[in-house]
Image (cartoon, coloured by chain):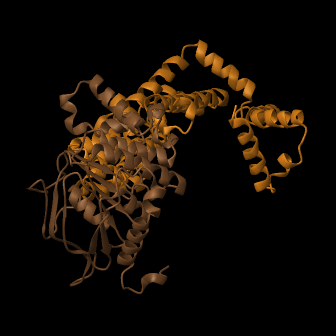
Amino acid sequence: MASEPLDSVTVDHARSASPVRSPTVAAGIDPAQRDRWRWFQRGLPYISVLVFLGVWQVVGDHIDPILLATPVNTAKAFWDLLTSGQLGPAFGSAMADLGIGYGLAVVVGVVVGILMGRSRTAERVLNPYVNFFQATPLIALVPLIVIWFGVGLEARVAVTFMLAIWSIIINTATGVKETPDALIDVGRVYKLSRLQLVSRVALPHAVPSIFAGLRIALGKALIGMVIAQMEVSVSGLGGLIINYGNAFKTAYLLAAVFTASLVGMIAAALLEVLRRWWFPWTTNDDRNLW
Amino acid sequence: MTAMGGARIEISGVGKRYAQRRNSAHVVLQDITLTIESGEFVSLVGASGCGKTTLLRMISGLAPYYPGTISIDGQVVRGVPKRVGFVFQDAALLPWKTVSGNVAVGLNEVRGSYTRQEIAGIVEEKLALVGLSEHAHKYPRQLSGGQRQRAGLARALVGEPELLLMDEPFGALDAFTRLRLQEELADIVERLRTTTVFVTHDVEEAVFLSDRVVAMGANPGTVRDVVDVDLPRPRTSREAALNSARGIELRENILQLVMGTHTDRVAH
């Protein structure tokens, strides 16, 4: 009760303190109109995609279907691939290659990153290699990987792993290294062991940075996975893409490409869910905290 | 007023210098000798660069390697001593832990002797002491600056330390919050009588809280004088303590000492 007059005072104060607000707010536009504008803004991504698909359909209808398949034909091709039992296994093999290669890169990358972040010596020893591989177009190494690992699952996993790991190492090392001295001091004052300083202070501090690295690495892992399925062993989604490309079946090619981006979106969403679930404090959204 | 538990600190002939270029070094602290009695609240006051924070870190064992010795209850400090509570400048809470999780960090040293439930109980009790009970499950970034520093204080107190070290704990807070926390700290200190070393550049804060104030000079950091703050305890009101005739006299006196004979009065 007592807080009511106080609140109104604060509001008045805020208003008078900032006479130059955005004109839409100050002019007191009809609230219904403002709501409609907001809904329109929120719907814009969907409208944008629908308009794009419409234009594509119209343009595609007037072009040689080998050059560009229409959205409708692509959807039909997608359905055909799905019902003929080609898409399911391809999707599964894409997920498996990605899961194993990327998963290994996460584990090894985080461990190496911690080591480089905490130990000057490790950093000095490993930095030349990290810099070299980060600068090298790693796709150029695919033939070498085939020589080493053959053309099976191991090779595809190796390509995926090789593309993904560097961003994870770099971001983990940076996050660990940038742990504020004050937090390390807290750990030392309260008698954390050297190992605990890493596991309870430096590593948690690096979590946001590590997840930023994981996002970048996921994109690279996807490229690695598809390239491997196209070039190492013609299999999975990459295999569908290259086979239908060679057969000039553009609609089927596009259907496989969209499935590959679906794999990417699922993986990215999974990563985001895990982050919010395991590390709610990394989110600025207070609904997750209370 | 009898001093209960609490460490006794002897600092003798301590210095600290940082190498700069070849053959030159910046002397941060020179020949500091000082004894802090058990249960005493001592403030280190001085302008920036007088080495007060460095001295505090040396007492805490966080900054080793220096000439001279610091001993706590007769034991020469090597590494962080047992049963120390430290309140950091900007609270230094772990962002990934809730308030109670952060406070529990202060129990890490003695964790083995308590069950999980006992720890929760102790943490709760200290949160109540600093008035944070309602915020136990919040994360640091959901707290105000003052609340963060309360949590930092609870973390320092939770292990029943024999020595409490505070590094400009209220320096970054707004004026009102600072005054309120000073009064609350005075109240807590009267009750616990833990030996406390408190670093600040705020002379009023130092006079209000301390039994003795160490006035330090800069370049190199030295002890200019140690002033007995003979204001009566308990000091419940900041106003009354600082604006008494003696209070004003002490503040003037210490301010003169800290500013010294140097010409940097027109600094900035």
Residue B56 visible within the image: yes
Which residue is more in the foreground, A135 or B160? B160
Residue found at x 73% / y 28%: A71
Q: Is residue A277 above or below residue B96?
A: above
User: Which of A281/B2 is in front?
Assistant: B2
Decide if residue A236 is on the left or right side of residue A51.
Answer: left
Residue A246: x %, y % from top left: 57, 33
Q: Is A206 situated above or below B25?
A: above
Chain for colour brown: B
Q: How many marks?
A: 0
Residue drawn at x 37%, y 32% as measured from the top left = A103
- The front one of A7 and B136 is A7
Query: Relative to A69, does residue A178 appear above or below in the rendering?
Result: below
Asked if residue A240 lies left or right of residue B112, the reply is right
Residue A84's spot in the image, x, y percent? 58, 13
Counting from the top left corner in percent of width and height, residue A126 is at 27, 54
Outermost front residue: B245
Quarter of image, res A9: top right
Residue at 31% from the left image edge and 62% from the top image edge:
B230
Question: Which chain is the one coloured orange?
Answer: A
Quadrant of residue B74 in the image? bottom left
Can you say which quadrant of the picture contains the N terminus of chain A? top right
Visible residue check, residue A151: no
